[in-house]
Image: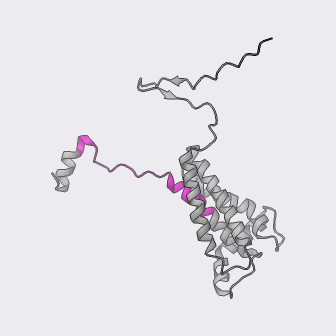
Amino acid sequence: MTITAPPPVAPPRPIPDPAGAAAVVVRERHWWLPRRVRLVDAGFTATAGALALAGLAPSFDGYQFLVVGLLGLLLGTAAGIYVVHLRWPRALSPVAAVAVFYLLGGVLCLREVSAIWPVPHTWRLLTDQLVFGWKDLLTTLPPVDGRGPLLTLPWALGLLAGSGAMAATSWKPPDRAGCEPSRRPPCSLRCGRW
C-alpha cells in the first residue's frame, strides 16, 4: 500500500477584465479577513486611544473605566475595520458604533441602576448620561465612582475614537478639480502659473 500526497491546491485563477485590460485575481479564501495594513492602523489606533483613555485616570476611582473604554475602543475599531473592509460607506462606521453603544451600554455602564437590557428606558438613561454626564464629571470632586453610570463617557469615547479613526484611515482625498493632464495648461493659465 502506497501513500500518496494530496494534489497541490491550485492558485486563484485570473478572471479577465470586461474591458480587456489586465486580469483581476479573485481572492477565494479568507475574504472576511482585513488586510495587514488595516490591522497595523488598528494597532496604532488602539495605542493612541489607550493613551487618551488613560488621561481619565485622575477623574475615576479604580480602573474599571479603562476596561470599559478599551472594550469600546476595540469594538469601535472592529466596526470601523469591517465597514472599510467590506467597502461600505464610511458613514456607517459611526452608525455601527452608536448601535453598539446602545446595545451593550446598559450591561457595561448602567449595572448599578438596574438597566441592563437594551430597551427604551436604558437608551434614555444612556443618552442622558452621554449628554449631561460631562457636567456631572466636571462638577463633582475627583475621583468619581468608577462603577457608576459615568462609565458611559469612556465607553462612548472609546467607541467613537475607534470607529472614527478607522473610517478616517481609509479616506483618500479627491483629485483636484480641473487638474487632469489634458486641462493643465488652461488651469495653470487661469491660476497664473505657466
- Pick whichever, 122 or 35, lies toward us: 35
Q: Residue furthest right?
A: 114
Q: Residue furthest top?
A: 1
Which residue occupies 58% across, 25% down?
Answer: 11
Q: Quadrant of the N terminus?
A: top right
Residue 100 in the magenta stretch? The answer is: no
* Residue extent of the magenta highlight: 159-183
The percent coordinates of residue 117 (x first, y second) are: 81, 62
Based on the displayed image, in which of its 4 quarters is residue 70 positioned? bottom right
**Above or below, 50 relative to 169:** below
Which residue occupies 82% across, 74% down?
Answer: 112
Based on the displayed image, in which of its 4 quarters is residue 54 positioned? bottom right
- Pick whichever, 132 or 12, lies toward us: 12
Residue 169 in the magenta stretch? The answer is: yes
- Pick whichever, 103 or 66, lies toward us: 66
The percent coordinates of residue 190 (x first, y second) are: 18, 53
